[in-house]
Structures are given as structure tokens and as C-alpha cells.
Amino acid sequence: MLEDSLKFLACPICHGRLDVEVNVIMGDDVIEGLLRCLSCGRVYRIRDGIADFLTHEILNEVDREVMFAYDKTALKYDILMTYVFPLLSLGIEPFERFMWVRELGLRRGSVVLDVATGTGRNLGFLARVVGKGGLIFGLDISWNALLVAKRRARSLGNVVLMRCNASYLPFRDEVFDGVMHVGGINTFGEKSRALNEMVRVAKHGGRIVIVDEGLKPSKRNTLVGRFLLRLNALYASLPPVKELPKGTTNLKVVWKVVPFFPYYVMVFQKR
């Protein structure tokens, strides 16, 4: 965890300021240590350079099951997303991921949050936009997925990884120029709370981009649509428009299909 990242962090439960106790440091990267909340006294561990903000009190049963599933399949998932999925999408998937990043409207030096970063597939795309002067925070509920993401992030240098529940973000208010989330919100245990948190930590005018599985309703009764819904029940998911909190504007929803993989892109801004 980069020492400079402390000014962005807060207790995920009470949002109090954090103090760091460093045990092992390499350059400006804290490898082992503790983060202590100056308000409520809760303590969070830093291990392997990753701050761990996940506690039992903020982990419901739905999110727990998702965490266990990704912990078991992290490496296989990464191989699937890095090699198999781009091939099945006929090379379109990496280009689409680049376009999702563009929707954030980031600049050189921007500070951006990747919610549910998984094994870090978005990190390289974000790094090319924000440059070495920018900062990327990637968080996930799966520790094993973050260990894979850590290997991917080594060459980037400006990435801070942490484990937490996306519905309880360990950040101060209004610190990010943009917030990105790809894959996962359809299965979040506290979807509305997660959206509120994404909006809370974004700066005024900052864009939030959410991408997940979903087939456009008008296509669901077609032959292909019925086949896809049998293939994956999550394709029946809708963009979480109704769960959006107040204080957002310029909402845009686009439905897309990468061969046999329908999804939606939801973009909005914090007022």
C-alpha cells in the first residue's frame, strides 16, 4: 500500500480518519502494518501490501458466498477473462473495456477507483489514461483475486489494492475523479448501498461507469434471447437505475452485445 494513499482513506464503518503503523516498508510501499481508526478505534491489517478492510460486521451472507466463489476460482477466472473471453468475443472485449474507461472522462494525474477490480483487468487501461502522475485504487472482496491483480499491477507502480466490501468503501468523501465498476453489481447483497457509496466518494462532476451482464428487454423474447437467458439467468438483470441515489445527473444507459455476451453500460455523474 502506497504511503501517499493514506490521505484518501477512512474507516469503512464510521468514516473516521486513519493512522498507519508501519511494520515493513519497501520504498514508499507499506508491506506489513496496521491502520487504526482515530474515531472508533477499529484496526485494519495491511498484509502483502494490501490493506484489508473486510470485517464480519459488514459481510452479509450473499456477499460471503460470492467471496468464497471467487477465492476458489481466482486463477481460472483470470485465465478465462485474459485469454478465453477476448478470443470468444473475436477481439472486441479489450476494445470495449478501453471504451468503458474513456467514458470516465479522466485526465493525466486523475485519481480513480475501480470497484470490484477482480484480478485487475481494468488496471492497465486506467493506467494508460491517468499516467504515472495519477493514482488508481482497485478493491475487491476476494483476497485471492487481489493477489492475482497484485502481479498485474507491479509494472504499473501507481496502483493501491485493498480488500473490502463495495457497500462499505474505506474512503473519505469526494476524493475520486471517476469511479468504475465492471461485473458484480447484479449479485451484490446491498446494491443500493453500494451505489450510494460510489456516489459519496466521487467528486462533484465526477463520472461513474457501471457495466454488468444484461440483455435488453426488447430482445428477450427472440430466439437468440431465449437461448441466452437459458445460458445465464443473470442476463435477465436490469441496470440499477431505480437504486440510484439523489444527487446524480446525466444518466445514460447503453445495451450492447459482444458475441453471446450481452451487457449494459450505465454512465452518470455526481452533481
Image (cartoon, rainbow, N blue to C red):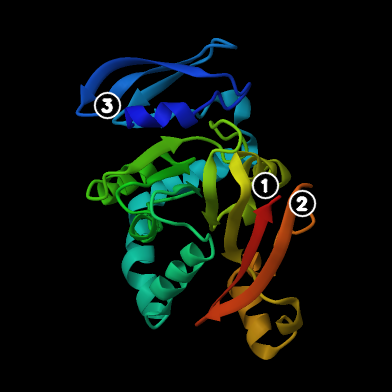
- Disc 2 marks a residue whose amino acid type is Glu
The image quarter containing residue 226 is bottom right
- Is 152 positioned to the left or the right of 106 in the image? left
Q: Position of residue 21 (x, y in %)?
A: 35, 13
Please tell me the numbered disc located at residue 248: none
Residue under pointer 3: 31
Q: Nearer the viewer, residue 237 or 46?
A: 46
Q: Nearer the viewer, residue 83 or 264?
A: 264
Q: Residue at x 37, y 65 (%)?
A: 80
Q: Is the residue under label 1 in contact with that under label 2 (CB below 8 Å)?
A: yes
Distance from the alpha carbon under mark 3 to that under mark 1: 30 Å
Distance from the alpha carbon under mark 2 to that under mark 3: 38 Å
Q: Secondary structure at mark 3?
A: strand
Work out whether 233 lies above or below 260. Answer: above
Q: Is the residue under label 1 in contact with that under label 3 (CB below 8 Å)?
A: no
The image quarter containing residue 14 is top right
Q: Residue at x 53, y 43 (%)?
A: 176
Q: Is residue 244 visible?
A: no
Badge 2 or badge 3: first in the primary sequence: 3
- Disc 3 marks a residue whose amino acid type is Ile
Badge 2 or badge 1: first in the primary sequence: 1
- Is 37 positioned to the left or the right of 77 in the image? right
Q: Is residue 268 visible?
A: yes
The image quarter containing residue 159 is top left
Q: Secondary structure at mark 2?
A: loop
Q: Residue at x 38, y 52 (%)?
A: 120
Q: Is the residue under label 3 in contact with that under label 2 (CB below 8 Å)?
A: no
Q: Nearer the viewer, residue 48 or 206?
A: 206
Residue under pointer 2: 243
- Disc 1 marks a residue whose amino acid type is Leu
Residue under pointer 1: 195
Badge 3 or badge 1: first in the primary sequence: 3
